[in-house]
Image: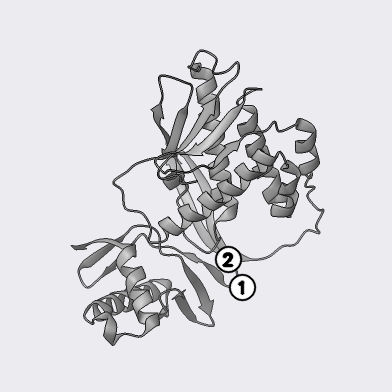
Amino acid sequence: MDLKAGIALEIGGELGKNNSISANSLAEIAMSFQSLIHSLVKYDLPSNEPVDVSNFNLELFEFKSCCAVPAFRLRQTDAPFPFNYDSQVLTINERLDVLFSISDEGNYMSLMEIYPEPFKRNEITDSFYKFASSFKDSPVKIYQKGILSDKTYKLKKFNEEIKKELITPIIDSVVSKEEDMAVGTIKVIKRGNKIEKRVIDYYSKDKNQLSYSPQKIEYDNKIFSLNYPLRCLFEKENSYYVITNEQLDIIGTGMTDREAEINFNEEFVYLYDRLNSLSDDKLTKRLVSIKFIMNNLIKEINDN
């Protein structure tokens, strides 16, 4: 399967008997297919990579007038994608092949082996069940658009009894109450005379860690706008504040969090300028990789 090229759903039986399909049925199919894709993005992509779920939104790009065959693909956009987007799409494509092979064989219980963790299996089972059930009892053939292939999947009936066997109830365990002093970021919202406070992020005074994810880097009268937040680790070690990004091998330190941020930004700009002043053959394999990541991370550079 290839979500970029498009996936066709050939619907027969009662649902597509007039070579058309009702708006309500089409909406239910589209929403359940979208929900399945988002569930796969949530649980099948590496957790240590930046992921924008909106990059996996679907669009209906074709509906044949001769028969009930809606075709869906990833939404076309001119917005820049993260450097690892193609590999993420490939992962989801491969997982769809696995799921459609399961439906073709009618062996839905194999989801138990593919997703041994209940918290993953429960959501994906539910999404897959809703997708399969959205066609009622009508026969469905699934095949690739735009690519010559003999491979066609059939969507066998997904019985509710099988779904119940696959879903494992998750019971919250009772834990003892613990109290800890913490430092964090609080969002203050003022509405008239009322003030609302929300905890955005916090870290324990014992662990002294929280995330730092700038959307832009400012230094030396330049603003580096990023395609996605740069996820870093923020720590306090003794009396020093430390910001670390292991992917780019950048560390910023300071007596205050602001000093650490300024130092981190300075190191970021220096590394970017230095790497782009040298050709790849003068850099180590690791530095070439960092250079590639930085150039794909930065959307634009403007004067402050």
The dot on residue 253 is none
Mark 2 and 1 residues: CB-CB less than 8 Å, in contact?
Answer: yes
Type of the residue with mark 2: Tyr
Question: What SS does tag 1 mark?
Answer: loop
Foreground residue among 126 and 137: 137
Q: Quadrant of the C terminus?
A: bottom left
Foreground residue among 118 and 101: 101
Residue 18 percent coordinates (x, y): 51, 12
Q: Which residue is mark 1?
A: 207
Foreground residue among 181 and 229: 229
Residue 100 percent coordinates (x, y): 60, 42
Q: Residue at the location (50% across, 46% down)?
A: 1
Res 225 → quadrant? bottom left
Side of 134 relative to 3 (left or right): right
Side of 155 relative to 81 (left or right): right
Q: Residue at the location (56% across, 62% down)?
A: 202
Type of the residue with mark 1: Lys
Question: What SS does tag 2 mark?
Answer: strand
Residue 110 percent coordinates (x, y): 73, 48
Residue 157 percent coordinates (x, y): 70, 31
Side of 106 relative to 58 (left or right): right
Q: Is residue 212 above or below residue 151?
A: below
Crowding near pointer 1: few (<14 within 10 Å), some, many (20+)?
Answer: few
Side of 99 relative to 86 (left or right): right
Q: Which residue is mark 2?
A: 203
Res 117 → quadrant? bottom right
Crowding near pointer 2: few (<14 within 10 Å), some, many (20+)?
Answer: some
Q: Residue at the location (66% across, 22% down)?
A: 137
